[in-house]
Amino acid sequence: MDTLLSKCLLCSLGCDVAFRVKGEAVVGPEFCETGGSHSARVCARGLYGAELMTHPQRVATPLMRRDGVLREASWPVAIDSLASALKSIASTYGPESVAVVTEPTRSTAELEAVGRLARSLGAGAVSCMFEPQDLPLVAHEESAGVAAVVEANCVIVLGDVFFSHAVIAKEIIDAKYTARGNSLFVVDPRLSNTAWFASEHVQNRPGTEALVLACVLKALRASGKMAADAHAWIDSIDEKTLLEAAGVGRDAVARMARTFADAGKAALVVAPAARGMYDVALVARLARLVAEVSGEQKACVLLPSGGNVRGARQAAAKSDWKPFSTLMSELEAGKYRALLSFGADPLAAFPSPALSKAISGLDLVASVSLFRGEFEGASSVVLAGASWLETDGSAVLFDDSVAEWKSVGSPSWGARTLSDVIGLIEAAAGQTAGRPGSSRRDGASAVLDPSRSTLTARIETVRAAAAARAGDELSLVALPATGHAGAGAVTGWMQWAQDVFPGGFCELSAQDAAALGIAENDSVTVESSTARLDLRAKVTDRLKPGVMAVPGYDSSARALFSWQVGEDGWFSTGPGSVRVRRKQ
């Protein structure tokens, strides 16, 4: 029995993983003896990643919809049918009526192959479906590596990094306890697992992390830690108003700022959930400024959720890809007649009646996927795709380092690698146009750059949004989970993840539950402007009154958030609003 090494792409850390392999069969996970990133430690996602290769519900062969039902088909028949449909649509409506979408757990080579196919088809759009928080987090700011946390005397964390990026928990805990006087501050509306270890938990109101960081900058200015002539805009900040909106005390912010600046080495870690933090691009910019003005040996660590987010961001910027928010708006406006998805499930990640209606009304919906998810339910052709463990590849991790891996096994059953599938489509469809479809140059940069308006204006927008909450509404935030990635389109099929991290629930504070007559495990009706769901109530002391949390890996719960595109051209990353009542 052999041991083969690979990488985990279910978050942006790119941890080393090892598997026992007998012949061509992957038997299970193995202790990883390499000296690479996070060697010998993986979270539940990485540990059970091999289940993806042998899962009994994997798409094992191509499927074609006949009489309303997806039925098995051979690869030649499925590819010829798809190519014929693409040619027909291109001939009737023009090649620009075809759109292509993928997602960032694909290797860099696979992403480039998707772009190449879109160009050969003359597609009107090609896009990468990032999680809502990921693209703004990496669009303009660089990140330090894990070493910045390991060596830190003070760490500030925004988000529940112990759940979203569980393996880094040891580095953060070690940084706190390595030397007497080391500190860990956690800014999070929820008393999360990360906050439980904090020297001080700064429990802000949902979405106000940018306000807290602005007040940290103000405190650094007031204490003389920042040069008097640096960033004059900070002087115009009304600290009292921002602190009131954030629901935190001035002394707590001042302690955090002073401890960070006085530390020999310090790191500020930002790990947002899918929803719950207003203007993530602004948060990333302010976090970097805090690190820059606090002196030498201060670092900013930005942790997107996806494995190859920075690699996908680079591919999108280099090849004129549209932001997925733009593609989604154009789909809903009826601009396209066909949509090809290479691993992405927009209906699970951004559920909305408008998007569902738009996709169901297309002439052609085709998917390359591991499982039959929400999107495959609307597809006329589903091709059996392979996971990253079944192919060689590379990815750009959160700190711009490049991870490379080799396949630990051949694609299961009748599945094929994404590069092979694209090659088959290219050979069958040919080149339907001599030029790629039109797209705005690096649209992600255009819509997400905090410098497009003044930082003070963006901070004021966050303050106003945080204050604009109706009295009978609860702020809605998304929860990450160690066992899931993104909207759970892949990890949601794993039995262990279903058992340990189930969906179908909401968290309520004990005070809100008492006021509403709701007890633990009661069935409650939760209603937002976009959806109405019956969920199971979990009463907790982890939340302040006025806040509800739902699992971000549950596509049904994600429907409670509005996915309308904002003025900046991207999805809101802030909290939603809901009303809740006990189901009679």
Image (cartoon, rainbow, N blue to C red):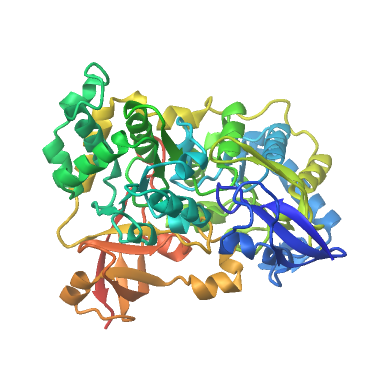
Tell me if 450 is positioned left or right of 402 in this view. left
Tell me if 331 is positioned left or right of 521 in this view. right
Q: Position of residue 32 (x, y in %)?
A: 69, 57
Residue 303 higher or lower than 227, as above or below: below
Q: Quadrant of residue 422?
A: top right
Q: Position of residue 289 (x, y in %)?
A: 34, 29
Q: Quadrant of residue 111?
A: top right
* The one of 561 and 226 positioned closer to us in this rendering: 226
Tell me if 367 is positioned left or right of 190 in this view. right
* The one of 303 and 517 positioned closer to us in this rendering: 303
Residue 529 seen in the current view: no
Residue 260 seen in the current view: yes
* The one of 417 and 484 positioned closer to us in this rendering: 484
Q: Position of residue 254 (x, y in %)?
A: 20, 40
Residue at the spot 53% in from the left edge and 52% down from the top edge: 346
Q: Residue furthest bottom?
A: 584
Q: Residue furthest front?
A: 180
Tell me if 357 is positioned left or right of 295 in this view. right
Q: Position of residue 558 (x, y in %)?
A: 42, 59
Q: Quadrant of residue 439?
A: top right
Residue at the spot 26% in from the left edge and 42% down from the top edge: 256
Quadrant for the C terminus in the image: bottom left
Residue 341 higher or lower than 225, as above or below: below
Count up the numbered dots: 0
Quadrant for the N terminus in the image: bottom right
